[in-house]
Image: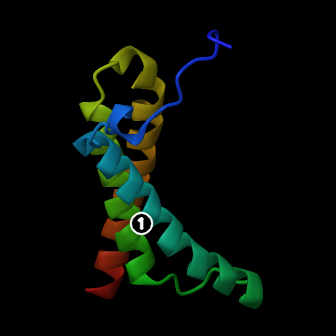
Amino acid sequence: MDDLPEPLRLEDLTEPPRMSLTEWLCILGYLCLVVCYTPQWIRIWRTHSVAGLDPYFLGLVTIGLAMLQAALILVKERDVVWPIILSNGVALLNVLVLDAFYAWAVL
């Protein structure tokens, strides 16, 4: 019976590490993208049309992609995330061009 390990006590457990700025930027960026995509996709599904995109949609996509790009740039192991940084940068550039055309059409 002496071979059994001692049971873990609550005092023996360590605290989880605090989340870094990079992790928070990733979470908030993806949350912005999900929050803005969902109503837009529901609207597109119901109307079967993409006419009249909401400006808040474009704004939240731009903010979400910018936060994700900032988080990816802050990652220390850049060798691993370079393809993601480049693809996210292209997507961000695309959204910025859409924002510019939208602003030009409205103003």
Which residue appears at 67% of the width and 82% of the height?
42
Q: Secondary structure at mark 1?
A: helix
Number of residue marks: 1
Q: Quadrant of the C terminus?
A: bottom left
Q: Label 1 neighbourhood size at 10 Å, few (<14), some (14-19), many (20+)?
A: many
Image position of 73 with respect to 58: above or below: above
Extreme residue in the front direction: 1
Q: Nearest the camera: 3 or 57?
A: 3
- Side of 31 where 67 appears, left or right: left
Rendered image quadrant of residue 50: bottom right
Q: Position of residue 104 (x, y in %)?
A: 29, 77
> How was this image coloured?
rainbow
Residue 35's place in the image compared with 74, above or below, is below
Q: Residue at x 30, y 29 (%)?
A: 75
Q: Give coordinates of residue 77: x percent, y percent.
A: 34, 18
Extreme residue in the top direction: 3
Residue 39 % position (x, y) = 58, 82
Q: Which of these two is toward me, 57 or 75?
A: 75
Tag 1 residue: 32
Q: In the rendered view, tell whether residue 48 sits above or below residue 1.
A: below
In the figure, residue 31 lies in which quadrant? bottom left
Q: Relative to 94, is 48 above or below?
A: below
- Asked if residue 17 shows in the view, the reply is yes
